[in-house]
Amino acid sequence: MATLLIDPIAFAIGPLRVHWYGIILGLAALVGLMVAIREGKRYGISQEFFMDMLLLGVPSAIIGARIYYVAFKWEDYRDNLWDVFKIWNGGIAIYGALIGAIICGVIYFRYKGYNFWRIADICAPGLLIGQMIGRWGNFVNQEAYGGPVEESFLRSQLNLPDFIVNQMNVNGVYHHPTFLYESLWSLAGVILLLILRRRPFLRAGELFASYFIWYSIGRFFIERLRTDSLAFQGPEWLVSFMNALWSPMVWLGFEPGYLDPAYGDVRISQLLAVGLIIAAIILIAVRRKTKQAQERYSDPIVSSKSTADQVPDTGAEEKGQLQEERAIQPENTPEQPEIPIADQHKKE
């Protein structure tokens, strides 16, 4: 018997039904945008630049997330291609969303004349905040949860409030609130990134790389608790390697979420998380070693094409006063020394 306590439909306008999931994702994107705008203001980058970025980035992220999911579940879609476009039935992947957003960012930032790493650094905390909020959409939909647990584990050991415990009761069985684990992990990551970005040692691109390292560490351990992972049949050595990396969770008393052996034995998100951690560390080391990361996070950001997206960080009144002062001030030209008349005749 289903025990869904929260109606996934927030409200309806005639035949149009608005889902909580969409509202939550919209809120996540808005908060992430505001964080990026606030930081961009310190570098004189206009909010219109970031708003245009969001308008381009969100569709790119959705397309990337869907392509990623469909690619690994192709057997479910190849006989009915129309289902590929039915994203309202579920089936998007966060790593695919990041790939789509990054591709869009590379193109958009280059078009605007900005260094990709500098803008990506500004966006990193906002991305993680968006993921932190967005996971609550999974909570409302009762999806992306972990394996079965006892109710006492949720109430007594985790001390979760009733509205979370009750929502984790899916068809009479309680499950790990993996959405909550990832949301809290992301919150800790946001705090870490906000601290890191004010450190003088931080170079361009390293905050963005740190975002991937932090998120991927948490995703690796949380993913193994879930029961809906994308997976494939991997070689025995790879399976043993992944099991060994996850073993600290076993020591803490956690058990892996069920994964049909016929479907796969290596979770794709776990493998990708390991690859991203290694790649981000190598990227930081190589960029420092080859002196490609000369700019620091705190250095000014200037577009190589146009200054249209860069505005002085002053209020309207201050701008007006500045213009008036410039209008009445004489040009700052060096004074010419007076030349004696006799000398003038000599020159002539």
Image (cartoon, grey):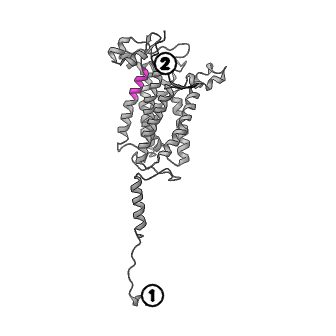
**Residue type, mark 2 in image:** Val
* Residue 275 shows in this picture: no
Q: Identify the mark nearer the N-term, 1 or 2.
A: 2
**Mark 2, other Cα within 10 Å: few <14 / some 14–19 / many ≥20:** some
Image check: 88 left or right of 335?
A: right
The mark lying in front, picked from 1 and 2, is 1
Range covered by the magenta-colored residues: 176-185
Image disc number at residue 239: 2
Residue at image coords 62%, 26%: 85
**Residue type, mark 1 in image:** Lys
113 and 203: which is toward the camera: 113
The image quarter containing residue 284 is top left
Residue at image coords 43%, 88%: 344
In the structure shown, which secondary structural element does the residue marked by tag 2 occupy? helix
* Residue 2 shows in this picture: yes
Counting from the top left corner in percent of width and height, residue 99 is at: 53, 33
Q: Which residue is mark 1?
A: 347
The image quarter containing residue 202 is top left
Counting from the top left corner in percent of width and height, residue 18 is at: 53, 26
Instruction: Work out which residue is located at the far front of the displayed protein and give it.
Output: 14
